[in-house]
């Protein structure tokens, strides 16, 4: 959680192709323990699979990513599914750490998030930032860390935003990311931003229109069905529409 918080604070309200957070000292046994904890705690979150969408070797441990032939040995694993990343970011310890008090805004500047829901952060400047999937965790022994040598662990991921104008920045198709994967990340941002809106967060009309547009396209089967008995309840609990979108629909 400390590694993830450090990475997000470095990004702030700006999109980044790669953000990295470090933690040390973290020995190999502790790193393997983090992997086992994620596998057990997130079991059942996503569809059945090896490690519940968490990469692992044949023995169920993080796999070797460097040093198989010579040199320093590095271990690593990835959280490679949207649902798993969202669940990890919804843990109580992570939310409490990410929810920096507003009083700290003056000292931390724009890096202090205003409201947090899972992997999404509503920044003071109005931008909505989001941790992108996949998230990569790595471990290296006797590595450089603030002028000393220590066993260290790091987390690495992309970070994109929905700006106040309702446009996405930093999340598109690349050599390592397909257009489908980029769209899934955008839907994840909109899903959690919608949770913030239900909690009272204030977004621009353009942001609300973009959020509603993505949610309607991604989850049409989850829209409320009207009936004679439940029509009024469905109308009250249905997806909220922004004034700008309502005008466009008319």
Image: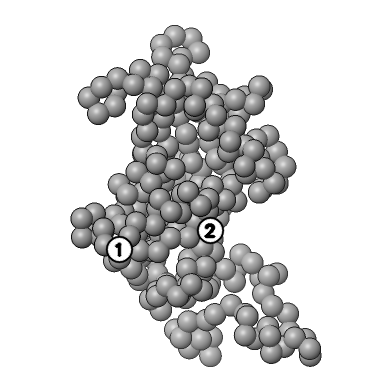
Q: Is residue 186 visible?
A: no
Residue at x-position 46% and y-position 49%: 94
Q: Is residue 226 left or right of residue 158?
A: right
Does residue 185 appear left or right of residue 8 in this picture? Answer: right
The answer, for residue 149, to whether it is visible in the render is yes
Task: Name the residue rendered at 48%, 41% in the picture.
Answer: 135
- Tag shown at residue 188: 2
Q: Is residue 106 left or right of residue 22?
A: left
Q: Which of these two is toward me, 127 or 214?
A: 127
Closest to the observer, 143 or 34: 34
Image vertical order of residue 142 relative to residue 183, above or below: above
Instruction: Give neighbour class at mark 2: few <14, some 14-19, many 20+ (Cα, 10 Å).
Output: many
Examine the rendered structure and indicate whether residue 59 appears above or below residue 19. above
The one of 64 and 173 positioned closer to us in this rendering: 64
Q: How far from the left and from the top, in percent, is residue 38?
A: 58, 38
Q: Residue furthest right?
A: 228
Q: Earlier in the sequence, mark 1 or mark 2?
A: 1
Q: Could you say whether the residue bearing mark 1 is in a helix, strand or loop?
A: helix
Q: Indicate the colouring scheme.
A: one colour
In which image quadrant can residue 161 be found? Answer: bottom left
Could you tell me how far apart the alpha carbons at marks 1 and 2 are, in whole angstroms?
25 Å
- Where does label 1 land, which residue? 102
């Amino acid at each position: 959680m400390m590694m993830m918080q450090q990475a997000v604070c470095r990004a702030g309200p700006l999109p980044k192709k790669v953000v990295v957070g470090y933690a040390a000292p973290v020995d190999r046994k502790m790193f393997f323990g983090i992997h086992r904890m994620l596998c057990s705690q997130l079991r059942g979150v996503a569809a059945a699979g090896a490690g519940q969408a968490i990469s692992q070797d044949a023995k169920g441990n993080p796999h070797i990513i460097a040093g198989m032939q010579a040199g320093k040995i590095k271990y690593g694993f990835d959280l490679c599914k949207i649902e798993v990343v969202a669940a990890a970011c919804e843990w109580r310890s992570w939310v409490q750490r990410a929810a920096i008090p507003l009083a700290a805004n003056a000292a931390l500047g724009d890096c202090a998030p205003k409201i947090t829901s899972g992997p999404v952060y509503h920044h003071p400047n109005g931008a909505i930032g989001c941790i992108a999937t996949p998230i990569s965790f790595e471990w290296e022994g006797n590595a450089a860390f603030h002028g000393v040598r220590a066993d260290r662990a790091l987390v690495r991921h992309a970070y994109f935003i929905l700006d106040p104008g309702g446009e996405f920045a930093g999340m598109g198709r690349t050599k390592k990311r397909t257009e489908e994967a980029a769209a899934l990340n955008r839907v994840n941002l909109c899903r959690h931003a919608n949770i913030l809106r239900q909690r009272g967060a204030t977004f621009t009309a353009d942001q609300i229109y973009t959020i509603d547009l993505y949610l309607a396209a991604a989850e049409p089967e989850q829209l409320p069905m009207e009936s004679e008995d439940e029509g009024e309840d469905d109308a009250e609990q249905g997806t909220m529409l922004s004034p700008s979108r309502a005008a466009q629909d008319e």
